[in-house]
Each structure stands twice: as C-alpha cells, then as structure tokens.
Image (cartoon, rainbow, N blue to C red):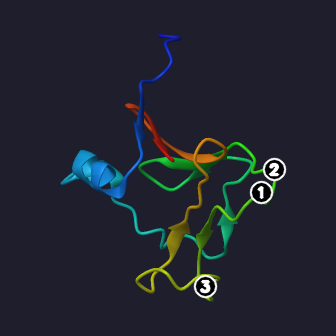
Amino acid sequence: MSNAAPAQTTFTSLSAWQAAVADSWQFTTSFQNFTQDTYFETAAVNVGPFSLQQVGLDPVNGLFQNFIDVPPFQFADHDGNTNAAIFTKYGVMTVNLTRLTGLLRCV
C-alpha cells in the first residue's frame, strides 16, 4: 500500500474544468439519492463517483452554504433538479472533489 498523496489538479475556470472532464463517466451523478439538504462544509459527503468537502473558512461569512440542495430549493440558479450548491472564495475557501485517481479542487 502506497502512502503517496494523490495528485492534485486546480481549475480556475469553468471552461478548463469542462475540457478536463469532457466525456468522462467518472463525473456523472444526479444527486437524486439525496432526500434532504446535505452539507459538506465540515465533513466530506460521498456523492457516488466522488466526494465533496469544503476546505477553508471564510473569516467574514464563516461556514458558507456548500451543500446538496434538494426541493424546496434555497437557490434558483440551476436546472430544477437536486444539485450541489458550491461556493468558493479564491485563496480563502475551496471545495475538494475527491475521486480514486486524485484530488480535484474548485477555486
């Protein structure tokens, strides 16, 4: 068993993220198995092919709304389906998406 840390890739734009995961089944999840809002601010949440976890703390807003949003929705900026409401603050707070082959960070 290796103790090596997983590789880390940082994406700073939506287009870079979409290019990296284009046609990848590994990132397909519908979040439909969630029946209540589930927060990943302080602990990782397994969403199937990966887990989500907030890293860092915004000194102004504290633990800031990183959760699986289910009906009735708190936010309307989505396609009407259960979704991951992910909020980051560059250099202060990120969200890690952890999968078997490494760590992806949304900033």
Name which of mark 3 and mark 1 comes first in the sequence.
1
For the residues labelled 3 and 2, the Cα–Cα distance comes to: 26 Å
At label 3, the amino acid type is Phe
Residue wearing tag 1: 63
Q: Residue at x 37, y 52 (%)?
A: 13
Which label lies toward us, 3 or 2? 2
Considering the numbered disc 2 on the image, is that residue within a helix, a strand or a loop? Answer: loop
Q: Amino acid under label 1?
A: Leu
* Residue occupied by mark 2: 59
Mark 3 lies on residue: 73
* Earlier residue among tags 3 and 2: 2
Q: Amino acid at mark 2?
A: Pro
What mark, if any, has residue 39 been given in the picture?
A: none
| Horizontal side, residue 59 vs residue 9: left or right | right
| Mark 3–mark 1 distance (CA, rounded to whole Å) | 19 Å
Residue at (49, 12) in percent of width and height = 4
Q: What percent of the width, then of the height, locates residue 45?
A: 61, 52
Q: Secondary structure at mark 1?
A: loop
Residue 87 in picture, x, y percent from top left = 59, 61
